[in-house]
Image (cartoon, rainbow, N blue to C red):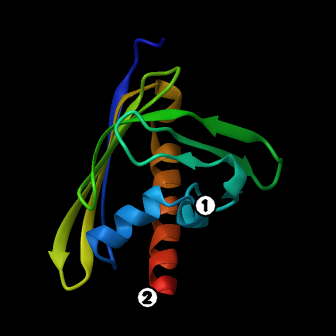
């Protein structure tokens, strides 16, 4: 494992309640609508989300232009419905957390934190990709309301 491990934090306000945003992350049918940057998709048949401690958090992102596939296999390490989702990515040990904060009036602040991030997943491209995924999540949430 690389010694150049880092951290990445992204904070976004979303137009939905914490419960609705949380469900978007743990319901595979919703997750595939937004996960990954523009130009990618996640086939529903590659997603396994078991919303419990020790449950699977697996998906495969496909690059639309090339067909290249990027599987992610993870284990949920902490979960509180509508408040928190934490996981560790199998194989590389990167940890991620999503914290959902109720701002009232149907809005939620989401804090995404990644720790022990390998150097190749750090930098402006990675941050842009995650923000693109958040943009897609906003579109999904607005379409559902």
Q: Residues within 10 Å of mark 1 (few under 14, many from 20)?
A: many
- Considering depth in this image, is 118 or 31 the residue closer to the camera? 31
For label 2, the SS is loop
Q: Is residue 46 left or right of residue 23?
A: right
For label 1, the SS is helix
Q: Residue furthest right?
A: 66
Q: Is residue 13 left or right of residue 136?
A: left
Residue 14's spot in the image, x, y percent?
33, 73
Tell me the residue at 51%/76% (across/down).
140
Label number found at residue 145: 2
Residue 25's spot in the image, x, y percent?
44, 58
* Residues tagged 1 and 2 counted as in contact (Cβ below 8 A): no
Q: Residues within 10 Å of mark 2 (few under 14, many from 20)?
A: few
Residue 77's spot in the image, x, y percent?
33, 34
Label number found at residue 57: none
Q: Earlier in the sequence, mark 1 or mark 2?
A: 1
Tell me the residue at 50%/25% (across/down).
90
Tell me the residue at 24%/66% (across/down).
109
Residue 112's spot in the image, x, y percent?
32, 50
Tell me the residue at 55%/57% (across/down).
35
Reply above or below: 19 against 9.
below
CA separation in Å, label 1 and label 2: 18 Å
- Considering depth in this image, is 115 or 57 the residue closer to the camera? 57
Reply above or below: 65 against 23.
above
Q: Where is the C terminus found, in terms of image quarters? A: bottom left
- Considering depth in this image, is 92 or 11 the residue closer to the camera? 92
How many dots with numbers?
2
Residue where numbered disc 1 is placed: 32
Q: Is residue 36 left or right of residue 80?
A: right
Reply above or below: 30 against 64.
below
């Amino acid at each position: 494992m690389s010694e150049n491990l880092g951290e990445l934090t992204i904070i976004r306000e979303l137009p939905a309640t914490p419960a609705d945003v949380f469900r978007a992350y743990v319901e595979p049918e919703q997750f595939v609508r937004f996960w990954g940057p523009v130009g990618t998709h996640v086939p529903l048949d590659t997603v396994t989300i078991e919303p419990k401690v020790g449950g699977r958090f697996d998906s495969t992102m496909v690059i639309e232009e090339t067909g290249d596939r990027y599987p992610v296999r993870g284990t949920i390490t902490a979960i509180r419905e509508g408040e928190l989702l934490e996981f560790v990515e199998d194989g590389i040990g990167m940890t991620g957390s999503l914290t959902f904060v109720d701002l009232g009036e149907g809005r939620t602040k989401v804090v995404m934190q990644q720790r022990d991030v390998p150097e190749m997943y750090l930098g402006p491209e990675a941050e842009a990709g995650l923000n693109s995924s958040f943009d897609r999540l906003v579109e999904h949430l607005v379409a559902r309301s």
